[in-house]
Image (cartoon, grey):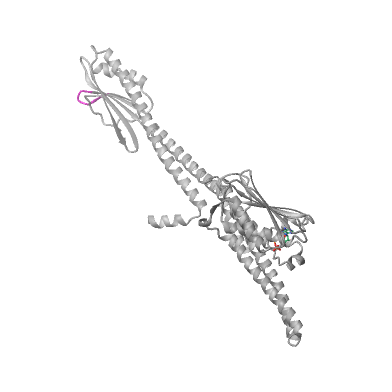
Amino acid sequence: MMKTLCALLSKLPIKWKIMLWSTGIMCILFAVYNAAQFITLGQWLNNQERVSMQKSMAQIQEYYQEKKTVLDVDQVRNSKSYLEKIIERRQLIRILDQNGLQIIAVSNRLPDDWVPPEESYQSLFISVWHDNEHLLVLRSPIHTDHFQGTVEIVNNLETLDQISNIILVVMVIAGLGAIFFSGFGGFLLSKQLLHPIQSLVETIQNIKVKGLQERVRPMNNNDELSRLAHHFNDMMDQLETSFQQQKQFVEDASHELRTPLAIMKGHLSLLKRWGKNDPQVLEVSLDAAIQEFQRMEGIVQELLELTRSESDHPEALIEIVKPSAFVQQCVERFSSAHPNMVFETDLHFTESDAIEVVPYQLEQVLVILLDNAVKYSADNNVVRINGMKQNHFVKIRVTDSGIGIPSDELPYVFDRFYRVDKARSREGGGTGIGLAIAKRLVERNRGKITIMSKEHYGTTVTVSIPACSKTE
Ligand code: ADP
């Protein structure tokens, strides 16, 4: 039974759970509080009644004690008028002799046969019932020189019980009202609290149906749930951007691969039609096909490197590198493959300057920059490499005096497959991926890369890597 109830409760929506809990707790609180209040009040009223009966008893005792020396049965009989004067509503006063026989009885709306007379040797209260009437009896002995007996005062507690009943009814009604309002309040509160969660659930459902662009409606308050909604939206923004980037990447890559494939197809058709018998056409077409193959190979290789630069960054490969010797070595290695170019290095690093990088990644960055400087140098054959430490950053600068980049194209050169002059760049073997790889690699090494260029004057690319605080 208890188990099925728990299982049933656990299946309820949170809204109803909150409401049930708040109502249940309110119910228990009210029951305990009202019961305690009711019992205390009942006891207090009962006490008041006893005090008032004791007062009447004391008054009667005093009256008889004053006549102590002369008081006898006749005198007691004559005291009826006094008793009639002091009797209260719904009360019975009786004087009994020492055998418990009634001498006089004065009553106010309380028939004297409801309580049988009984002598008593000590003062005490007794609670008795006559049918539905609740009666309280106080008996107290009288001792005078010529008279021994008992004074009996009987009070009907009907009024007291009525008051108690009214209080009980009021408490129950007020309690039920409070429970209803607390349940209603709990319902409103849970509705208010769960509103953001509800809209989160709706948004997630919509995302499934309509796509990633769905967002939770922004809320103005700054509570935990609105922050949850805010973070959810942020997460969805990131997810959407990364999805779009992936899509863009696939589109760009397939577009880039389509060009060499189309060229190769053209040359192969040419070969099929004319080339078999014309050695000149054969030679030219095969050369062109091989060239396009090499280009495709290059694109595929660079794509792989780009993916690698995005994903892999093994911590174990990070080394503390002295920039001076490192840059010098890289430039020397690169320059040996370009005997026609002049590489001027001007490095201002001290012995203590160091950076924490993955060396092969930084070398790859420098090769990309030097390669671009050579590719786009036109007639000018001097490339300058500067190095210095500035504001806790090690800066390496590659400058050429080549064709430069128009200022409106400058913001896009770090994008994948972006080429300023498509035709010329293709001729020079450019794929438009080099700078994108360089940027990714620099960022993976916690650095920044910037480019400055003026068309027909030249280009400067600066790589800044945070200088290492630990020096050997
Ligand atoms: P690519 O393989 O085509 O050189 P990059 O990503 O390295 O691709 O460069 C993107 C574009 O930026 C190039 O197509 C080129 O037009 C331009 N660019 C890059 N470096 C230089 C430079 N040093 N001088 C002039 N233009 C450059």
Above or below: residue 430 compared with residue 405: below
Image quadrant of ligand 1 equals bottom right
Name the side, left or right, on which 96 lies relative to 286.
left
* Highlighted range, magenta: 97-103
Residue drawn at the location 55% of the way across and 58% of the way down? 313
Residue drawn at the location 32% of the way across and 38% of the way down? 131
Above or below: residue 91 compared with residue 129: above
Above or below: residue 183 compared with residue 141: below
Instruction: Name the residue nearer the viewer: 35 or 376.
Output: 376
Name the side, left or right, on which 451 lies relative to 199.
right
Residue 303 picture location, percent across and down: 63, 66
Does residue 98 belong to the magenta stretch?
yes
Quadrant of image for the N terminus? bottom left
Residue most extreme to the right: 456
Give the quadrant of residue 376: bottom right
Residue drawn at the location 52% of the way across and 51% of the way down? 15
Instruction: Name the residue nearer the viewer: 357 or 226.
Output: 357
Inspect this view and state whether residue 170 appears. yes
Inspect this view and state whether residue 214 appears. no
Residue 132 picture location, percent across and down: 34, 38
Residue 308 picture location, percent across and down: 58, 62
Residue 395 picture location, percent across and down: 64, 49
Does residue 4 belong to the magenta stretch?
no
Instruction: Name the residue nearer the viewer: 139 or 366.
Output: 366
